[in-house]
Amino acid sequence: MNIRLASGKEIPVEMHKVRIVQKVNLPPVGERLRALEEGGYNTFLLRTRDIFLDMLTDSGVNAMSDNQLAGMMVADDAYAGGESYYRLAAAVEDVLGYKYVLPVHQGRAAEHLIDKVFLKSEQVVPTNYHFTTTRAHIEILGGIMLEIYADEALNTRSVHPFKGNIDINKLKEVIKKYGRERIAYVRMEATTNLLGGQPFSLENMRQVRRICHEHKLLFVLDGSLISENAYLIKQREEGYENKSVAEIVKEMCSLADVYYMSARKNASVRGGLIATNNERYYLQLRDWLPVYEGFLTYGGMSVKEVEAMAIGLREMTAYDVAGCSVQQVKYFVERLLKNDVPVVTPPGGLACHLDAKLFLPHIPQSQYPAGALSAAVYLAAGIRTMERGTISTDRDKDGKEIMADLELTRIAVPRRVYTVSHIEYAVDRITWLYKHRDLVKGLKFVAEPPVLRFFFGRLASVDNWGKTLCDGFKKELGDY
Ligand code: F0G
């Protein structure tokens, strides 16, 4: 909850208390350099023992609640027909309003099944924006993602409250150009991840829904970050101020034909699900579930996680839970803005995003500014972040580099994990880095996998800048 202090300053006060802790280690800057070099300048290849604040992602690393942990103890371990599944189904019906649910081991497994059932080669999927795994599954099957965001979406210095909206005119054009037969489905992603955690409005979603209905197109909602999109609708969309997050979530779900989510985010577990009210879709998807995931009542998940997912779904729409990360992100973004550090605005969900093109304007996109910045933040702070730019965009079929629309360094804020003092530390070190940005140069690949290269790719620093930056840090700030 945001509290205004007597001084006038606002801080996001944590609405939970910490009852289990994990020791973290702040390695000295020389050690960070060694670890980064061992990891090929790729933050995915760091070990957590070398990391102070792990802000790589909010996925699967949120703090669970006491009730979720307690639920794990009463999970019903059965291959088929376990009660945990029925408790999950009841939660899905109560919270999301869907009659049918299929658990899957994580979000991309849902994408895999949805594409297997609904997508044919050469078909297109119009969407507000791609997510990496979403696009990979579509392309593997010979499909094409069409991003039909409004132009404002790529403006990182915007005040537009709903940069995750679909551009309705572009949607109409796509329908005119491809026709119903060539459109597999229309996809909307809540709190659009790769645009910098930007929400869409319910008004926009309703328009998309209306058009889909008119043209008999399937409408799929990726709700991995649904409670945060709903929280931002409550804050920003006229007419929703007095609705609860739970009501808004339900309204969003009522508009989609097929819903899926990575439950690793808003539901604070390690799993995922697909849900629908359409029996035919459900049966089509269900028949493939045991082939790729597991039997219907566990879907490839540990039943402990199934039980905790049921509880996490019920908890995620509570105002303070839906808002805990959003409020910290807002604080983070506003503190950096005050220091003139270029960040994506307005603040959204899931993370604070540095705009690497503006932070490091001297690095050409072919030398991966967002990757370089992610490496530099680790060196300057021991904080692990994620490159969300050209490294995260695979080459085209002919091996040509595709320059990403945005070069973002994502500093994720997992839910209920870090405190305001951690954010203050991050702000200080990132500001220091911004003042010394000339020391940072580009990266080049030394080993590049053919698909989702950002996971395992190895890079090196141009002119060995990693060492220069560490020497500069040491001279001013010492080892830490
Ligand atoms: N859709 C969205 C919007 C996501 O953010 C993610 C994952 C997925 C689908 C895939 O789900 O990881 O459970 O298989 N996002 C993570 C991230 C990986 O770090 O943003 P998954």
Image (tube, rainbow, N blue to C red):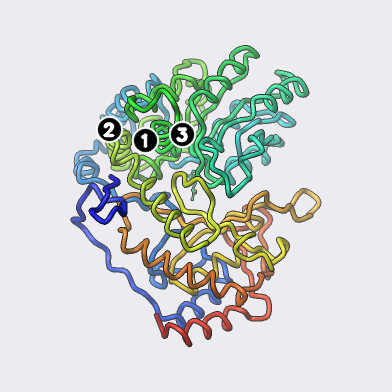
Callout 1 secondary element: loop
Q: Residues within 10 Å of mark 2 (few under 14, many from 20)?
A: many
Mark 2 lies on residue: 84
Query: So how many labels did they put on this image?
Result: 3
Residue 240 in sight here: yes
- Most foreground residue, 267 or 172: 172
Q: Which residue is mark 3?
A: 223
Q: Which residue is mark 1?
A: 298
In contact (CB < 8 Å): disc 1 and disc 2? yes
- Examine the rendering and report whether any part of residue 294 can be seen: no
Which amino acid does the dot numbered 1 rest on? Tyr
**Horizontal and vertical percent for residue 162?**
53, 35
Image quadrant occupied by the N terminus:
top left
Q: CA distance from mark 3 to mark 2?
A: 22 Å
| Residue under the image location 22 percent in, 49 percent down | 16
SS type, badge 2: helix
Q: Which mark is residue 457?
A: none
The disc, 1 or 3, on the residue closer to the chain's N-terminal end is 3
Crowd class of label 3 (few under 14; some 14 to 19; many from 20; radius 10 Å): many
Where is 242 relative to 231, above or below? above
Image spot of residue 275 (x, y percent): 44, 26
Rendering coords of residue 119 (x, y %): 64, 28
Observer-nearest of 161 and 101: 161
| Side of 220 where 174 appears, left or right | right
- Asked which quadrant contains residue 9, the reply is bottom left
Disc 1 versus disc 3: nearer the observer: 3
